[in-house]
């Protein structure tokens, strides 16, 4: 079974991939923006630029982004180093364009801040500080070696000054891109945090199940001997003349034997549900037969006034009789019986490739807090120590099989628990349906 750390690595990879996609989109915006800016400045404002050289650099940026798009289309694992390298390429391209168009006097030099902020959001600490150092050196290099733009010193003209106009466009561009892409990146990070929290919760639940499995193993060993002794004693009592001649006593002995057997079944079921290997007592059967026998056994061993069982599965399918599945359904039925001794309803149906089990009752329904934390351990309103473990085990057994468990309160009163299991997890592979209840 994959470890929680494996799941965390996959979550980080998925987040890195999404962030790389954001960088690729941002680079497309930058390419289009650079093209129009070069054209407007060169032809609109009449400011001479080495347009051929700048378009070559722009073509290199587009080619790099196209290669990145192809690379990350098929390769979905993105590391911090790869994000760092992508930002370094962007800084390099921006530096060359600024060098060709005025160096540090170009108002678009403040686009370096965009790269620094993206690095602070996307990268590890050492990578971010490296980005700060690289952009600072690039700015200083442009100031030392760049050739200033031939612009008039008319800053006092306000928005009529081409330099002030360039600064305004740079500010608006920085602000718009930061709001757009930082919002998306933060959403990716929040989704990652939510997935990591889910993995941690699942790891805690699985650790809880392991502890319960150890306790169940100890309980099984401790209870096995006294239960076996009771079964032997009851068998001896049944043969004694005093009991054999008294029909009432014989009936009570039979009831006691049934309850002892039920205790042994419960211990075995808890052992399986708490994480032991499935299939230890498996046998070939069919889905309809399995649930028909489960319903009959549950009805015979519980005191209920009315138990309605409705098998709507349709064409039968072969399956492996699984004690964990049996205990899971019995736990839900027991909870329904405790809430509604007068009536319990079980419906077995099929929805495409999914087995659907619905257990309904006419009790008071689930409390709001229990529904909000359904399937969490110790979520119970019964007020007894250890309450709420039954549904916790049910949810985890279903999840192990790839299924789900949901609960709702019915409009007319009562509650309904729905279990869905993929047929592939319980049916025998490679066999056709329609065998009947053989």
Image (cartoon, rainbow, N blue to C red):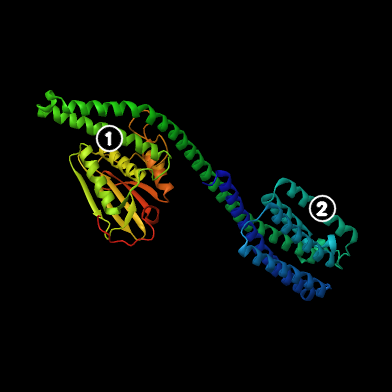
Q: Which of 406 and 277 is in front in this view?
A: 277
Q: Establish if 427 lies above or below 386.
A: below
| Res 418 visible | yes
Residue reaching furthest to the top: 242
Q: Which percent across, then down, holds residue 85? A: 74, 57
* Number of marks in picture: 2
Q: Do the CB atoms of the residues marked 1 and 2 lie less than 8 Å apart?
A: no
Instruction: Name the residue: 70% across, 47% down.
Output: 124
Q: Which of 320 and 170 is in front in this view?
A: 320
Where, by quadrant of the figure, is residue 118 drawn? Answer: bottom right
Task: Answer left or right for 406 relative to 175.
Answer: left
Instruction: Name the residue: 49% across, 42% down.
Output: 202
Q: Which percent across, then down, holds residue 402? A: 43, 51
Task: Answer left or right for 388 relative to 105.
Answer: left
Mark seen at residue 262: 1
Tag nearer the camera, 1 or 2: 1
Q: Which percent across, then down, holds residue 188? A: 58, 53
Q: Which percent across, then down, holds residue 71? A: 66, 64
Q: Residues within 10 Å of mark 2 (few under 14, many from 20)?
A: some
Name the residue carrying label 2: 136
Where, by quadrant of the figure, is residue 28 drawn? Answer: bottom right
Cα distance in 3D space between marks 1 and 2: 76 Å
Comes first in the chain, label 1 or label 2: 2
């Amino acid at each position: 079974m994959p470890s929680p750390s494996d799941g965390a690595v996959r979550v980080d990879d998925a987040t890195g991939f999404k962030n790389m996609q954001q960088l690729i989109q941002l680079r497309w915006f930058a390419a289009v923006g650079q093209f129009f800016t070069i054209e407007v400045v060169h032809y609109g404002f009449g400011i001479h630029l080495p347009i051929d050289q700048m378009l070559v650099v722009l073509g290199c940026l587009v080619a790099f982004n196209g290669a990145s798009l192809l690379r990350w289309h098929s390769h979905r694992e993105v590391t911090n180093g790869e994000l760092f390298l992508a930002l370094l390429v962007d800084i390099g391209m921006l530096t060359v364009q600024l060098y060709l168009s005025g160096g540090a006097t170009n108002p678009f030099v403040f686009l370096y801040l965009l790269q620094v902020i993206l690095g602070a959001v996307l990268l590890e600490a050492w990578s971010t500080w490296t980005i700060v150092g690289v952009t600072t050196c690039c700015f200083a290099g442009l100031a030392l070696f760049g050739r200033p733009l031939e612009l008039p010193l008319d800053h006092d003209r306000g928005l009529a000054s081409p330099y002030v106009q360039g600064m305004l466009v740079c500010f608006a561009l920085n602000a718009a891109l930061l709001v757009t892409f930082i919002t998306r990146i933060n959403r990716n990070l929040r989704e990652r945090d939510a997935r990591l929290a889910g993995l941690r919760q699942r790891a805690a639940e699985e650790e809880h199940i392991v502890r319960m499995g150890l306790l169940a193993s100890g309980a099984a060993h401790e209870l096995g001997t006294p239960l076996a002794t009771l079964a032997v004693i009851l068998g001896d009592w049944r043969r004694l003349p005093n009991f054999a001649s008294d029909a009432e006593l014989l009936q009570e002995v039979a009831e006691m034997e049934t309850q002892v057997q039920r205790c042994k079944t419960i211990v075995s079921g808890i052992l399986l549900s708490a994480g032991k290997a499935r299939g230890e007592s498996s046998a070939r059967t069919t889905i309809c037969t399995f649930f028909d026998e489960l319903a009959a056994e549950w009805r015979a061993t519980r005191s209920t006034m009315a138990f309605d069982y409705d098998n709507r599965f349709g064409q039968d399918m072969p399956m492996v009789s699984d004690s964990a599945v049996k205990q899971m359904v019995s736990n839900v039925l027991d909870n329904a019986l405790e809430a509604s001794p007068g009536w319990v309803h079980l419906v077995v149906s099929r929805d495409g490739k999914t087995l659907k089990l619905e257990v309904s009752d006419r009790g008071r329904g689930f409390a709001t807090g229990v529904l909000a934390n359904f399937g969490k351990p110790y979520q119970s309103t019964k007020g007894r120590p250890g309450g709420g473990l039954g549904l916790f085990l049910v949810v985890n057994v279903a999840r192990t099989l790839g299924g789900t468990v949901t609960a709702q309160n019915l409009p007319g009163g009562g509650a309904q628990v729905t279990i869905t299991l993929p047929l592939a997890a319980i049916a025998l592979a490679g066999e056709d349906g329609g065998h009947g209840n053989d």
